[in-house]
Amino acid sequence: MKLVQVAGYLGSGKTTLILDLVRAMAVDGVKVAILVNDVGEIPVDGKVLSLSGMTVKDIGGGCVCCQVAGNLMKTLETLGTTQKPDIVIVEPTGIAVPESIRETARMASRRVKVTLGPVIVLFDTTRVDKLISYDTINRLVARQVNDADIVALSKVDAASEEAIAKSAAEVARINPKARILRLSAESGEGIEELARQAQRELAPV
């Protein structure tokens, strides 16, 4: 069971990307579980069930959307013994940063087999000035980018080349080691590459 994180500031396109990744991986027969605080957050029709104390929505292709039950560690343990997905996608909520999710995975790995996939952070190219100018926002975005393995420059179809270049430069300044990809939910640019990267195993926890 591989843990993949999709993080980013509010409105950067995380839910859309997660659904696009699930669809792309399901074509290859990969079983994916999405972990959310409320299954109603994911705008996909599907039968909602209660399994092993978890609220689960079947979203097709052998993939499910699961509501976090109690806490993340407990939910990972339940998933590992019941649903047994190939990949678990987690979207850190609020001010959570990727490293805190990694630590939870390490604790869960004492009971179920968990490996770490990449941390994918979205950087909204249409709001680059806001993201780097507002101090409170900048600190959160910088922490997320610093923890990223891959930074997806989102909404490139709606941004100018100048804004995209400025976004890429800011990301590279914060985290020179992160891989930077262009992403567009509108055209599909970058989706297949991110799906391939999500399936790449980085390291045991």
Image (tube, rainbow, N blue to C red):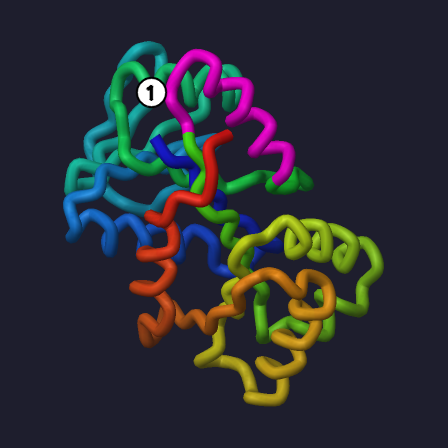
Residue 30 appears left or right of 19: left
Residue 181 appears left or right of 113: right
* Nearest the eye: 115 or 91: 115
Residue shown at 26% from the left, 24% from the top: 84
143 up-or-down from 67: above or below: below
* Residue 117 percent location from the top left of the image: 43, 43
Residue 9: which quarter of the image? bottom right
Residue 146: which quarter of the image? bottom right
* Residue 180 percent location from the top left of the image: 53, 68
Q: What element carries label 1?
A: helix
20 up-or-down from 157: above or below: above
* Nearest the eye: 62 or 56: 62
Q: Indicate whether residue 102 is drawn in magenta.
A: yes
Span shown in magenta: 99-114
Q: What residue type is labelled 1?
A: Gly
Residue shown at 25% from the left, 27% from the top: 48
Name the residue tied to disc 1: 80
